[in-house]
Image (spheres, rainbow, N blue to C red):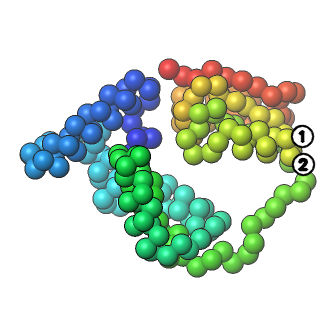
Amino acid sequence: MFIGGLGSDLDGRRADLADTVRLLARAADQDPVEPSQLFAAQLDFLLTGAGSAPASQMTAIICGDVAERHGTGSYWHAVQASRERFPLAGPLANNITPCEFWDRPAETPTVLHNDVPALLVTATGDPRTPYAGAEAVREQWPSSRLLTVNGARQHGLYGEYGNTCVDEHVNAYLRTGRLPTHDLNCEASH
């Protein structure tokens, strides 16, 4: 869904989403519309190969991990069931994905039963990976450290979100190879 790429601040993203929804409503009524520059870029991303490299990488990761087949008809039912409760995003979130047509993974998922000294970077409002998952990994890996961005509704953080606190801590780790002595917190960028 295109909401994630809209602007850098929450108010700006809400305004961009509201503008986009108004354009879509007018287009649905068959009124001529001129997409905003942002919406035109999103349409280009969704309808052409523009920017497909990151999306292709994500598809390969997701489908390579769990290429589950539900049957094409199940998606139609899921889309219809989501329309009443989530009319804007429900059909998008429940639509068929390429994973339906991929072969099952060649090997079983890797399970790590060891302690991994890693710097885990996450946000409490990550829309893709719940914060509880990061906490669970941190618990399984006592030698790791958790860098939490409190209040951020953001998935990509390092080098993407524009948070100096995150970038400085990750850069220090990459520069020295040494983990912080304790878990760290940064505040969301606004």
Give the residue at x 79% y 45%: 137
Type of amino acid at the residue the image marks with label 2: Asp
Give the residue at x 38% y 60%: 80
User: Which percent across, then down, holds residue 148?
Assistant: 70, 30
Q: Seen in the image, is 180 located left or right of residue 50?
A: right
Q: Secondary structure at mark 2?
A: loop
Marks 2 and 1, how far apart at CA? 6 Å
Q: Secondary structure at mark 1?
A: loop
Q: Seen in the image, is 44 located left or right of residue 170?
A: left
Label 1 Cα crowd, 10 Å radius (few <14 / some 14-19 / many 20+): few
Q: Which residue is mark 1?
A: 142
Q: Nearer the viewer, residue 77 or 42?
A: 77
Assess whether mark 1 and mark 2 are in contact (beta carbons under 8 angstroms): yes
Residue 25 in sight in this render: yes
Vertical placement of 51 versus 190: above or below? below
Type of amino acid at the residue the image marks with label 1: Pro
Give the number of callouts. 2
User: Which percent across, then down, holds residue 17?
Assistant: 33, 35
User: Which percent across, then down, holds residue 90?
Assistant: 41, 51
Vertical placement of 48 versus 17: above or below? below
Q: Which residue is mark 2?
A: 115
Of the residues under marks 2 and 1, which one precedes in the sequence?
A: 2
User: Which percent across, then down, holds residue 175?
Assistant: 75, 35
Residue 159 in sight in this render: no
Give the residue at x 15% y 42%: 26
Q: Seen in the image, is 26 located left or right of residue 187?
A: left
Location of residue 169 (image quadrant):
top right
